[in-house]
C-alpha cells in the first residue's frame, strides 16, 4: 500500500522545512510527497528544491498562483498512491502517531478491507501563545467504529464534532477519482466544506481512530485568520454549489442533513457580511436565501426552533443586518473601554 502526501505551498518559507522534515521522519511506510508550489514569491521554492534534489520520493510541481484548491486538485491528478493525505505547508506531522495510523490502515488493506476514509485527531498550535490544544470533540466510544460517510456526518452534526479540517483524514484515492470529487476552484477560503460533504456522501467505509495525525498552526497572516468579505462570498458560493448538487437527492434523511448544512452556511455568510459592514453583499445573499427558502429550505424537516429561526431571517433581513451591526459597534466600544 502506498501513501501520497499532498502539500499545497504558498509563501511559507518560515515553516516549510519543519513540514517536510516531519514527513521525512516517517519510517516503514511506502510514500510519495507531492508539493504543489502555488506561485510562491518568497524563498519557499528555493528551500524545497534542496529537498527534492536529496530525496527521490519528493516531487515539486510549480504553477501560477491559483489558490489551494487548484494546488490540491493538481496533487490528486499527479499522485499514484492508494491513499491520500493532505498536509498544509505550515503544519507538521506527529510522526510516531501518524505511523501507527497508517500501519493500521495497511493491515486493513492487506486483509482486503479497503477503507474509504480514516478519521483521526490533530493538535492546534498557536504562534501567538505557544499553546497546544488537542481536538477531542469526537466521543471516545466511537474509536475503532466503522460506518458510512453519511452516518459519520449525521453523528458529527448531532454531537457537534463536525470538522472539515483536511489533515485529520486520510482518503482512498479511488474514492476521489471514481466519483470525480475535486476541490471547488476560485475560492480563497472554506473550499474544504463542499469537498468534505461530497466525500462523506460517497464514502461507504469510514473508520475512526483516537490517534493524532499532526499539528495545525494558527498564525497571523493566514487566510482564515483575516476576516474579509471574501469569506462571506466564498461561503455563499458553497451554498449555491451544494444546492445544485443535492437538490434532487431522493433519500429524505440525507437531503435533510445536507440542507441543514446549507442553512448553516447561509447564516454564516450573512453573519460575515454583517461583520464586514457590507449591506450590499448581505442583501444579495439574503435575496437568494429567500428564494431558496421557498424552493427548498421551508420544505426540509428541522426542529421547531430552527424553523422559527429560518422564518425570522426570511422576513426580517434588514432588521437582522442593522441589529447585527449595532451589536458589533457595542462590542467594539466595550473592548476599547476595557
Image (spheres, grey):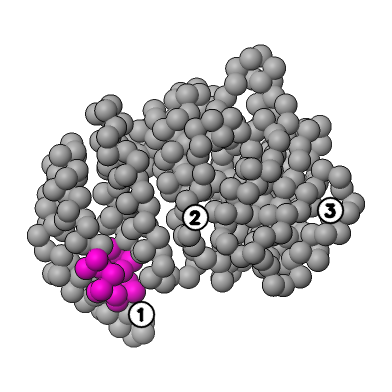
Q: Residue 55, how many percent across, how many down? A: 87, 48
Instruction: List the single residue furthest toward the bottom.
Output: 337
Q: In terms of secondary structure, where does tag 3 sit? A: helix
- At horizontal 21% and vertical 56% (from top left) the residue drawn is 289
Q: Earlier in the sequence, mark 1 or mark 2?
A: 2
Q: Residue 70, how many percent across, how many down? A: 57, 54
User: In this picture, which residue range is highlighted in magenta?
Assistant: 270-284
Q: CA distance from mark 1 to mark 2?
A: 37 Å
- At horizontal 60% and vertical 59% (from top left) the residue drawn is 217
Q: Quadrant of the N terminus?
A: top right
Answer left or right for 197 relative to 214. left
Q: Tell me, yes or no, whether the highlighted magenta stretch contains residue 144.
A: no
Q: In terms of secondary structure, where does tag 1 sit? A: helix
Along the line of sight, the residue nearer the viewer: 181 or 170: 181
Answer left or right for 214 relative to 296. right
Residue on which disc 1 sits = 335
Q: Earlier in the sequence, mark 3 or mark 1?
A: 3
Q: Nearer the viewer, mark 3 or mark 1?
A: 3
Q: CA distance from mark 3 to mark 1?
A: 49 Å
Q: Residue 46, how many percent across, how many down? A: 81, 66
User: Which secondary structure type mostly characterizes the magenta part of the structure?
Assistant: helix
Answer left or right for 237 relative to 301. right
Q: Nearer the viewer, mark 2 or mark 3?
A: 2
Residue on which disc 3 sits = 52
Instruction: List the single residue furthest toward the right.
Output: 54
Q: Nearer the viewer, mark 1 or mark 2?
A: 2
Residue on which disc 2 sits = 185
Q: Is residue 303 visible?
A: no
Q: Tell me, yes or no, whether the highlighted magenta stretch contains residue 271.
A: yes
Q: Residues within 10 Å of mark 1 (few under 14, many from 20)?
A: few
Answer left or right for 229 relative to 17. left
Amino acid at each position: 500500500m502506498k501513501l501520497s502526501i499532498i502539500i499545497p505551498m504558498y509563501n511559507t518559507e518560515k515553516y516549510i522545512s519543519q513540514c517536510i522534515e516531519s514527513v521525512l521522519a516517517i519510517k516503514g511506510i511506502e510514500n510519495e510527497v507531492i508539493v504543489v508550489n502555488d506561485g510562491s514569491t518568497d524563498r519557499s521554492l528555493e528551500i524545497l528544491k534542496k529537498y527534492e534534489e536529496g530525496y527521490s520520493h519528493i516531487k515539486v510541481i510549480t504553477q501560477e498562483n491559483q489558490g489551494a484548491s487548484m494546488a490540491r486538485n493538481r496533487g490528486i491528478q499527479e499522485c499514484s498512491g492508494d491513499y491520500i493525505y493532505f498536509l498544509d505547508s505550515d503544519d507538521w506531522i506527529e510522526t510516531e502517531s501518524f505511523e501507527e495510523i497508517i500501519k493500521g490502515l495497511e493491515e486493513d488493506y492487506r486483509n482486503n478491507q479497503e477503507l474509504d476514509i480514516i478519521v483521526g485527531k490533530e493538535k492546534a498550535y498557536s504562534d501567538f501563545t505557544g499553546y497546544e490544544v488537542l481536538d477531542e470533540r469526537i466521543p471516545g466510544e466511537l474509536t475503532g467504529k466503522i460506518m458510512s460517510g453519511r452516518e459519520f456526518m449525521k453523528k458529527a452534526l448531532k454531537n457537534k464534532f463536525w470538522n472539515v479540517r483536511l489533515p485529520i483524514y486520510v482518503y482512498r484515492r479511488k474514492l476521489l477519482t471514481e466519483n470525480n470529487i475535486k476541490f471547488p476552484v476560485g475560492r480563497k477560503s472554506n473550499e474544504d466544506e463542499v469537498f468534505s460533504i461530497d466525500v462523506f456522501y460517497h464514502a461507504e467505509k469510514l473508520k475512526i481512530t483516537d490517534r493524532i495525525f499532526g499539528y495545525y498552526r494558527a498564525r497571523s497572516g493566514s487566510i482564515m485568520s483575516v476576516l474579509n468579505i471574501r469569506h462571506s462570498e466564498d461561503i455563499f458560493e458553497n451554498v449555491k454549489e451544494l444546492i445544485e448538487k443535492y437538490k434532487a437527492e431522493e433519500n429524505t434523511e440525507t437531503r435533510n442533513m445536507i440542507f441543514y448544512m446549507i442553512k448553516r452556511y447561509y447564516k454564516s455568510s450573512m453573519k460575515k457580511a454583517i461583520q464586514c459592514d457590507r449591506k450590499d453583499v448581505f442583501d444579495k445573499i439574503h435575496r437568494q436565501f429567500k428564494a431558496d427558502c421557498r424552493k427548498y429550505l421551508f420544505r426540509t424537516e428541522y426542529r421547531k426552533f430552527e424553523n422559527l429561526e429560518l422564518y425570522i431571517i426570511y422576513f426580517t433581513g434588514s432588521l437582522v443586518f442593522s441589529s447585527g451591526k449595532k451589536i458589533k459597534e457595542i462590542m467594539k466600544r466595550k473592548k476599547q473601554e476595557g
